[in-house]
């Protein structure tokens, strides 16, 4: 399965739909879907930030700029440990399973994007000084 297609299914609208079925309609089949809602919301927020390319994007889909770096940094600090605590169906940590690459790639991306962005933004700012 392609990662970009899999990530499209983990959207905030999916989390909202599950929450609606759980809280508003109070369907018994969805009473224990709180962890799934949290997982989908966290992964959606992280991938929105990491995939921000549109200069006109809003919210978490906006590109990295000096004003939003503190917000993004705080979100990543909150959620960086989350993927490391995910469990498989056998109650084994995902990072100790055969499918650990996804977790490591996600955490490494979150931990490196802000410092790399700050370096690039400083270079861009310095480049405009000489124009």
Image (cartoon, grey):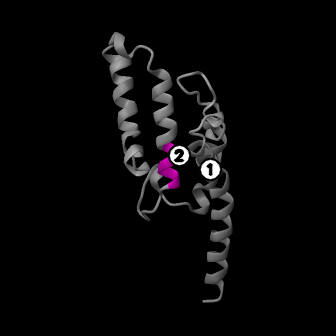
Pick the residue in front: 84 or 98: 98
Residue found at x 45% / y 53%: 61
Say which quadrant the C terminus sits in: bottom right
Judging by the rendered image, the residue that carries numbered circle 1 is: 110
Closer to the camera in the image, 96 or 49: 96
In the image, farthest residue toward the bottom: 131
Q: Quadrant location of residue 16?
A: top left
- Residue under label 2, please give it: 46
Number of residue marks? 2
User: Tags 1 and 2 in contact by the CB under 8 Å rule?
Assistant: yes
What residue is rendered at 64% in x and 38% in y? 78
Q: Residue furthest top?
A: 28
Q: x and y percent of residue 17 in the render?
A: 33, 29
Residue 3 in percent (x, y) is at: 43, 49
Distance (Cα) linking label 1 and label 2? 8 Å
Per the rendered image, the range of residues in magenta is: 45-50
Q: Which mark is residue 66?
A: none
Name which residue lies at 45% across and 15% down. 32
Residue 87, compared with residue 31, is above or below; it is: below
User: Callout 1: 10 Å neighbours few (<14), some, many (20+)?
Assistant: many
Identify the residue at image location x=42%, y=45%: 7
Residue 1 image offset from top left, x and y in percent? 39, 46
Is 95 in the magenta? no
Residue 113 position (above or below residue 90): below
Magenta span has 47? Answer: yes
């Amino acid at each position: 399965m392609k990662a970009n297609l899999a990530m499209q299914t983990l959207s905030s609208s999916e989390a909202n739909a599950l929450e609606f079925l759980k809280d508003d309609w109070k369907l018994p089949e969805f009473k224990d879907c709180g962890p799934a809602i949290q997982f989908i919301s966290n992964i959606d927020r992280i991938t929105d930030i990491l995939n921000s390319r549109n200069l006109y994007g809003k919210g978490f889909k906006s590109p990295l700029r000096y004003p939003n770096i503190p917000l993004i940094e705080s979100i990543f600090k909150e959620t960086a440990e989350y993927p490391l605590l995910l469990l498989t169906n056998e109650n084994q940590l995902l990072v100790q399973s055969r499918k650990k690459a996804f977790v490591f790639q996600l955490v490494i991306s979150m931990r490196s994007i802000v410092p790399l962005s700050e370096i690039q933004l400083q270079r861009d700012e310095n480049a405009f000084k000489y124009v």
